[in-house]
Image (cartoon, helix red, strand yellow):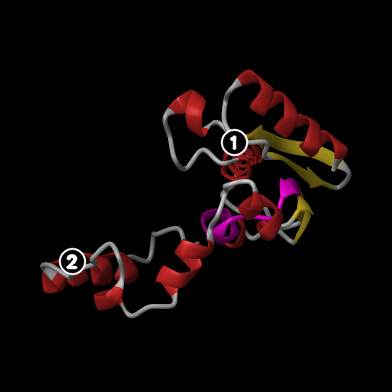
């Protein structure tokens, strides 16, 4: 955890983004690490957890991080929470809370509120277009016996 906190501190001091650092561990070995690089890369998805997940998956040569633990300086935001679940991380340890982050300007409550609303009441409209055509591609993919299931 101290390493994750230090990565967050160094990244913030370098101007890369907020003070969010992450380390991913498997069997006592660090297999991935990252820090918030939103500002440095102009990428709003470059949160510490996402950067670390990408690093770990590259190193272990797999899209699943089952058997891994993730240490992050701050409680994961909704995007990182989702990425952690998609990566199948076993356990998450965090430092400061979502409320602590909100208190200094990293407020994710608006995202949680939007997720709770029906699609037609969200701030950013989500409109289905060409659903039938898209569904054909999805069904063809699902029917392919050679596809990699994840």
| Magenta span includes 81 | yes
Q: Residue at x 65, y 28 (%)?
A: 12
Answer above or below: position of 53 versus 121: above
Does residue 52 appear left or right of residue 115 in this picture? Answer: right
Q: Quadrant of residue 29?
A: top right
Query: In this orientation, which residue lies closer to the viewer: 59 or 74?
Result: 74
* Residue 116 x, y percent position in the rendering: 44, 77
The stretch in magenta equals 71-83
Does residue 28 appear left or right of residue 5 in this picture? Answer: right
Q: Residue furthest top?
A: 14
* Residue 71 x, y percent position in the rendering: 77, 48
The reply to whether callout 2 and callout 1 are in contact (CB within 8 Å) is no
Answer above or below: position of 145 versus 72: below
Q: Secondary structure at mark 1?
A: helix
* Residue 117 x, y percent position in the rendering: 38, 78
Q: Give the quarter of the figure containing the N terminus.
A: top right
């Amino acid at each position: 955890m101290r390493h994750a906190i230090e990565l967050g501190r160094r990244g913030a001091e370098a101007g890369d983004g907020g003070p969010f650092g992450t380390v991913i561990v498997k069997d006592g070995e660090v297999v991935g690490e990252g820090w918030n690089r939103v500002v440095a890369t102009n990428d709003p998805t470059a949160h510490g957890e996402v950067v670390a997940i990408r690093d770990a998956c590259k190193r272990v040569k797999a899209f699943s991080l089952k058997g891994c633990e993730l240490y992050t300086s701050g409680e994961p935001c909704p995007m990182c929470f989702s990425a952690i679940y998609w990566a199948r991380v076993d356990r998450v340890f965090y430092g400061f809370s979502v409320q602590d982050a909100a208190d200094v300007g990293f407020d994710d409550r608006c995202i949680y509120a939007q997720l709770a609303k029906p699609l037609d009441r969200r701030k950013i409209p989500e409109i289905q277009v060409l659903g039938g055509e898209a569904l054909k591609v999805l069904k063809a993919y699902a029917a392919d016996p050679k596809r990699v299931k994840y």
